[in-house]
Image (tube, rainbow, N blue to C red):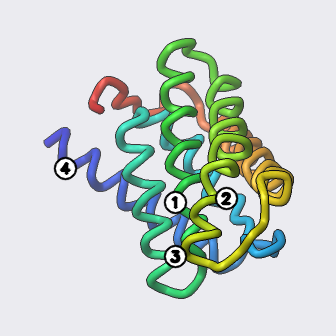
Amino acid sequence: MKKIYLLTLMAVFVAIGTLGAQFFWFPAGIAKAYPVQHAVNVMAAITLGPGPAVVIAFMIGLLRNMLGLGTILAFPGAVIGAWLAGMLYHWFGKKIWAIVGESFGTGIIGALTAVPLANLFMDSSAGALFFIPSFLVSSVTGAFIGWLVLLRVKPENMIRLQGNY
């Protein structure tokens, strides 16, 4: 029963991230910024753990690409950010660390990872300095949105399935 519940919550997060991308995004160079993705990453990392957060981030990126709402750049930032947010929250137990993990994982590491992908798949010669500002703006904005949402959730109502990754 616990696995079904976990899969259901993951599906809800994927739906929120995919639908939210349709309504709330902004252009950031050749990349598109999707703060809802990063909000979902933080919420999933805190409530479900790093493993499910990574799967959710990947599925949102995959669906966005299949629907024509995103680019290949959706994968490196979101997945790395979700993993780092989940791991830092798991290690330190404070929500602020999930925000730091999402922001640094997506904004810095994901942006650096996006450079070779953009060269290979998008025929872009943009360097890291081109991606870092746009990735940072999107991830920091989204991470704080996720944090604000979780502030409104009472701790006794928050379902924690940590450790199931």
Spatial distance from mark 4 to mark 3, Cα to Cα? 24 Å
Mark number for residue 4? 4
Task: Write the residue at 72% across / 41% down.
Answer: 108
Element at badge 3? helix
Quarter residue 160 falls in: top left
Tell me the crowding category of disc 2: few under 14, some 14 to 19, or many 20 or more residues within 10 angstroms, Cα based: many
- Marked residue nearer the N-terminal end (1 or 3): 3
Element at badge 1? helix
Q: Which callout, 2 or 1, points to the residue nearer the camera?
A: 2
Q: From this viewpoint, which residue is outermost toward the bottom?
A: 68
Q: Amino acid at mark 3?
A: Arg
Tell me the crowding category of disc 3: few under 14, some 14 to 19, or many 20 or more residues within 10 angstroms, Cα based: many
In percent of width and height, residue 114 lies at 63, 58
Pointer 2: what residue?
115
User: Residue 96 versus residue 157: which sits nearer the camera?
Assistant: 96
Mark number for residue 75? 1
Q: Which callout, 1 or 3, points to the residue nearer the camera?
A: 1
- What is the quadrant of the C terminus in the image? top left
Spatial distance from mark 2 to mark 1, Cα to Cα? 12 Å
Task: Write the residue at 65% across / 46% down.
Answer: 106
Q: Amino acid at mark 2?
A: Val
Mark number for residue 124? none
Tell me the crowding category of disc 1: few under 14, some 14 to 19, or many 20 or more residues within 10 angstroms, Cα based: many
23 lies above or below 17: below
User: Residue 16 versus residue 111: which sits nearer the camera?
Assistant: 111
Q: Amino acid at mark 4?
A: Ile
Element at badge 2? helix
Q: Amino acid at mark 1?
A: Phe
Q: Which callout, 4 or 3, points to the residue nearer the camera?
A: 3
Quarter residue 119 falls in: bottom right
Spatial distance from mark 2 to mark 3, Cα to Cα? 20 Å
Mark number for residue 64? 3
